[in-house]
Image (spheres, grey):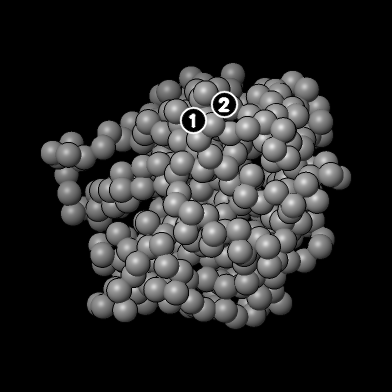
Amino acid sequence: MTIHPIDPSSFHHSTATLSNGKTFHWVDEMPSNYERNVTRTLILIHGFPALWYEWRWQIPAWVAKGWRVIAMDMIGYGLSDKPRDLQHYTPSSCAADVVALLDHLQLDRVTVVGHDWGAYIAWRMGIEHRNRLDALIPISVMYNPPAPTYYPVDQLARWYPGIFGYWQYFCSPEAEIEIQSNLSNLFDVYYRSLAERSSQPLRGTGEMRAGVTGRRVISTPADLMTAEEKSVYIEALEKFGIAAPLRYYKSHRERWDQEKEAEKVHSPYFSKSLPVLFIAPTGDQFASEPFLSRSKPFIPNLEIAPITSGHFVLLEKRHEISQIVGDWLDKLDGKIVEGGAGLPTFVPSTGVEAANQRETAILTPVQF
């Protein structure tokens, strides 16, 4: 069956209850010559407010490379379970869900690719389940080790309104009802290109709410997707609700608690043997230099691929993302020589640089 990226029915879908008792839905595409635990397998982890469908443009490109590609509906989304307990929505818990799926599919080691919250989950997999990864590719959101002290979202929003103002709204009592009643507006605010987001950021405290409720008119709404694509998301959220996806933001305290507890067992530093590619959109605040410089010392085998884009780079630079990931993994597999014609620039984070930064880059208030 030919994959048509905009049409969800053109993909192969599976649903199962895993060993942790949770039911998950995922899309699973295999190349014709697939061999379990021989063929490279990519696990794709989406963010907010997306579904597995966030990866619709990348899946066929990577299957064409000869790889198996699996894109999950994460907990709280689509046909996957939606428990009420916030403990289920932390990156650590979600990383364990991914491992449960790997066990279900009898997959030993995979390449994990994540965007937005999916990137955060991918980072936690590299810390807590490093033996299940052969490579790690987070997109848009840099690794963020837990701060030594817990900072509530309201405090972070006061310190950094341009970064955490919208978090404050998503955690508020009124957000669920207002967003559920204005789903189209949410997507109009969210899925905009770098140019449009630069002209109307809508990140500060109160600005996201104004955009969602329609008090702030968006000049070029949802310019990164067609009406048909937008309807796929809207229909899912109309059916299943926005309450569960918002729990990723509301579980802020639970996330910090779990990650501090994990530090008793797992080092916050990544293994030198794990190759990591961070794809850094130049217009994404969570991929900006303060985040990069603070976190590089924790990731000894890190390469960075800058790309001119806003946060939703999977759409804004859909073909470039497919190529960057494909070329980097080919490089790991020895299929291409770095620096060849047409290849993107991968910037290594050297051990010397990491050593020089290690003492000064660990603790800052922006950690959360």
The answer to whether residue 327 of the structure is visible from this angle is: yes
* Disc 1 packing (10 Å; few <14; some 14–19; many ≥20): some
* 274 shown above or below 301: below
For the C terminus, give its image quadrant: top right
Q: Say which residue label 1 marks.
A: 196
The secondary structure type at the circle numbered 1 is helix
Q: Residue furthest left?
A: 341
Pinpoint residue 4: horizontal percent, then vertical percent: 35, 67
Would you say 351 lies left or right of 171 here? left
Disc 1 residue type?
A: Glu
At 48% from the left edge and 19% from the top edge, which residue is drawn? 356
Q: Secondary structure at mark 2?
A: loop
**Few, some or many residues within 10 Å of mark 2 (<14, 14–19, 20+):** some
**Residue type, numbered disc 2:** Gln
Rounded to the nearest angstrom, the CA distance separating label 2 from label 1 is 6 Å
Left-right relation of 186 to 114? right
Q: Residue at x 44, y 52 (%)?
A: 226
The answer to whether mark 2 and mark 1 are in CB contact below 8 A is: yes
Residue at the image point whose x is 46% and y is 41% from the top: 223
**Measured from the top left, where is residue 39 in percent x and y?**
31, 70
Mark yes or no: residue 296 visible: no
Identify the residue position indicated by label 2 in the image. 200
**Viewer-nearest residue: 351 or 335:** 335
Q: Nearer the viewer, residue 126 or 94?
A: 94
Say if 195 sits above or below 103 in the image.
Answer: above
